[in-house]
Amino acid sequence: MSDIPNVLTPSGLKRRSLLGGAAAFGLAVPFAGALGRARAADATPVKGGNLKIGMSGGQSSDSLDPALLTNYAPTLFNYCWGETLINVGLDGTPQPNLAESWTSSKDAKIWTLKIRKGVTFHNGQTLTADDCVKTLQRHMDPKTKSGALGVLGGIASVATDGDAMVITLSGANADLPLLVTDYHLVVQPGGGIDKPTAGIGTGPYKVGNVQPGVRYSGTKYAGYWNSELGHVDSVDVIVMNDDTARSAALQSGQVHIINQVDPKIVSFMKRNPRVVIETVAGRGQNIFNMFCDTGPFKNNDVRMALKLAMDREQLTKQIMLGYASIGNDFPINKAYPLFPSDIPQRTCDPDQAKFFYKKSGNTDPIVLRSAEVAFSGAVDAATLFQQQAQKAGIPVQVVREPDDGYWSNVWNKKPFSASYWGGRATQDQMYSTAYLSKADWNDTHFFHPEFDTMLLQARGELDTAKRAEMYHDMGMLVRDQGGSLLPFFNDFIDARSSTVMGWVTDANGPLSNYQAPLRVWLKA
């Protein structure tokens, strides 16, 4: 296809590049302290300083509106200025935040969250239960573009009750506290309905200079309520999508922390005594999305052919150099409770792939779009997969897209593209965000009524054994009929200067689950 720029042929692969559970029903949850505890040796915070973080995952079309967050950089900064009702603890259980405690009815359909007193927004306004209610209502609106729309789909109503908010569900859900940990749901004054991009929240840092795709700056908010977080005077999040520039900036001391360290240079960076590599295996996944409703992928024989053509072991070994675990075309791994471990692992079978591809009747080239911003090694991974597919007689063309604009012009727009997910706190949350038919971020266009029904039933099933059985069946549906081509679950590989203290290893997400600027401090 001559009109497609930057098509990479199989021979074009660069040689150098192959290198919680819910709260107990009816029991109030006491305030459990900070988001995590620093390592004992680093346990005395030092106040002050300017923390600089170099990050991949930012583009000029990014926004401060929490509903529209898609990239790493604005998501991390979102946690600097905003806070959710509840946080995810290091052990995956819900932890109090702006909601200091919660209770549920015995059938887990009605949840009452007590809103913390003495908290103020950066504009001086006092946090109220009404702000919390309106925040959820904004993200529940069927017209919203919020990535949390699918997560909130089970909420029938939300209202105030004095200093508390009451969430009434259409069906039982024992995981409700974990659902409201979604990072889109930072509480804004008046729910952010009038000014969604104002960047006014209750977090430890006030929004300063913001240039989407370039830099985000914040300064310490003197009225912040939690003395255990937010130790530095100011935070700068600098967008550095280029892997080489990002790692060089850390090693030269221009920044203190970086994300998405390329696995190929981890061993090299470890030789620098001023650099510390932080890795953790979690729920993160690197994927190639196929639209199930768009040709040629609307034919499941094409999807199955591509799945069978993929050599996941080779991809994991050559692209991630061991910093990953093999995927199985559904978005759940052993990091999740009730992981269906008995689902057979799909393996590469070129003969079967060839059979399904011939059966599909498709003969046109299959265009796969990728960019380094999709995940570290994404272009190489696409090109290596191109070679694998060629062994099964499947013609894949790889198009390298520009990093800037990738998430607005390619992801969830083009029918076959590289992407990533950081994972979610629960299976329900992961499926509700990306696989429920009406979810705005259903990026494989997996519109499956049977799956939707099973998801809603599992959400209300309080019998753990029955719920696990439902998750098994849902995993099989996505694996065999979905549009996720999922080679591996990536480890989160971050790096910090040795002058950064108080790092908390958190498997819930990259950069200490996006909480690094809140948790760390600079060595005096």
Image (tube, rainbow, N blue to C red):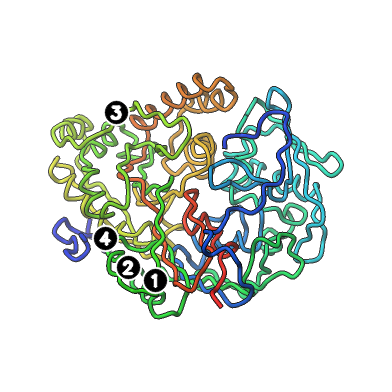
Identify the residue position indicated by label 2 in the image: 270
Amino acid type of the residue tagged 3 in the rendering: Pro
Is disc 3 placed on a helix, strand or loop?
loop
**In front of the other: 112 or 335:** 335
Identify the residue position indicated by label 1 in the image: 275
Amino acid type of the residue tagged 2 in the rendering: Lys
- Disc on the earlier residue, 1 or 4: 4
- Disc on the earlier residue, 4 or 2: 4
**In front of the other: 23 or 236:** 23
Taking the spot 28% from the left edge, 54% from the top edge, the residue there is: 320
Disc 2 + disc 1, Cβ < 8 Å: yes
- Disc on the earlier residue, 3 or 4: 4
Left or right, 392 with reference to 281: left
**In front of the other: 223 or 437:** 223
Left or right, 308 with reference to 391: right
Location of residue 239 in the rendering, given as x and y in whole percent from the top left corner: 47, 70
Q: CA distance from mark 3 to mark 1?
A: 40 Å
Identify the residue position indicated by label 3 in the image: 344
- Disc on the earlier residue, 3 or 2: 2
Is disc 1 placed on a helix, strand or loop?
strand
Is disc 2 placed on a helix, strand or loop?
helix
Identify the residue position indicated by label 4 in the image: 3
Is 228 rendered above or below residue 24?
Answer: below
Q: CA distance from mark 1 to mark 4?
A: 44 Å
Q: CA distance from mark 3 to mark 4?
A: 41 Å
- Which of the 4 quarters of the picture holds residue 158? top right
Is disc 4 placed on a helix, strand or loop?
loop
Tag nearer the camera, 1 or 4 = 1
